Image (cartoon, coloured by chain):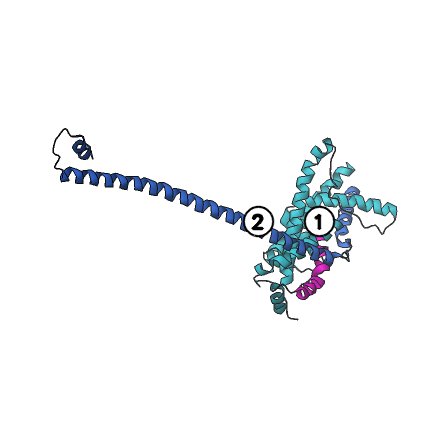
Amino acid sequence: MKNDQKISDDVKKTISLLDNIKKIEPNPFLYTRIKEGIDSANNKKSVLSIDFAFTLFKQIVFAVLFLLNIYSVISYLSNGKMIGQYRMQYIKNVVSEYSIKTESDYLTNYVSKD
Amino acid sequence: MQEAELINRLKQKDEDAFRIIFNDNQKKILNVCYRLVNDEDAAQDLTQEVFIKVWSSINQFRNESKLSTWIYRIAVTGSLDYLRAQKRKKRLAVFNYFSGGGEKQFEIKAPNDQDPQMLMENAERFEVLNDALNKLPENQRVSFLLSKDDEMSAKEIAMILSTTVSSVESLIHRAKKNLERILYNYYKKQIV
């Protein structure tokens, strides 16, 4: 019983410490430190925005180069096809102009293959 | 100056408005941080971070609460993040010890305006209290510690924690009961 009372007293005393926590005073240079913090954050932001712009520029250049490459490949392939078609047309014209009708003729076979 | 006008001026990055808001709130914010982290230097640093955030994030303030409540919310969140980081550091302390490093650990300080014997006794009690508080769930601990601030009502705590007044009252009640239970068990072990 005596022990219980002592424990209860200790508990009360310990919890009551929270009621006596002293109020602390702000550091007199707190505002100056905050201003410095804001300024350095702003500087960081502008450096970051330059970095961001440069990164964005690099990505755009890369994308443009990539698209140009794709366009070159496509146009090369389609040009090759076109050249083939022009050649075929030319051969057909030559064949019809000179009335080449031999079955074993290389040109005719070449045309008929396509 | 009306609060709405102050907020508008702050949104336009007006330093005078910021200074007014700082002067009105700095002491309260510092003491809220101090109450939660129990370290004066850390509380000063946290207060600095809070006001930098107020300046940089004022455009995110939606006028759904008072400006001071919004600032308190930033302070509470910052303090809890700090405590979580300290806990992580504490877990790694054993590795730091073996590697010869180690940083200053979080410790509660007793008021130093008393006689040495009382000071020692209180320092021990503070340590016990700190351990007991750390065993409480975070929302109970925060509600309970904020309720110990004379200037903060349950309604204000509810707004800071984005909850209801009845919920805050219940959290405070449960925190007190749990704290008493933890301390009771601790002192009982000491006697046996």
Q: Is residue A78 positioned above or below B139 on the image? A: above
Seen from the viewer's position, the closer of residues B37 and A10 is B37
Name the residue carrying label 2: A51
Q: Amino acid at mark 2?
A: Asp
| x, y percent for residue B11 | 60, 63
Marked residue chain, label 2:
A
Look at the magenta stretch and give its main secondary structure. helix
Residue found at the very far bottom of the displayed protein: B1
- Which residue occupies 65% across, 61% down? B68
Disc number placed over residue A39 in the picture, else none: none
User: Any magenta on residue B24?
Assistant: yes
**Whether marks 2 and 1 lie on the same chain:** no
| x, y percent for residue A94 | 17, 38
Residue found at the very far front of the displayed protein: A98
Q: Amino acid at mark 1?
A: Val
Rendered blue, the chain in question is A
Marked residue chain, label 1:
B
A80 relative to B148 in the view: left or right: left
Q: Is residue A59 positioned above or below B91 on the image? A: below
| x, y percent for residue A36 | 70, 55
Res B14 → quadrant: bottom right
Question: Distance between the Cα atoms at labels 2 and 1?
Answer: 37 Å
> What is the span of residues highlighted in magenta in the rendered image?
B14-36
B26 relative to A96 in the view: left or right: right
Name the residue carrying label 1: B37
Rendered cyan, the chain in question is B
Seen from the viewer's position, the closer of residues B181 and B7 is B7
Res A22 → quadrant: bottom right
- Which residue occupies 85% across, 47% down? B118
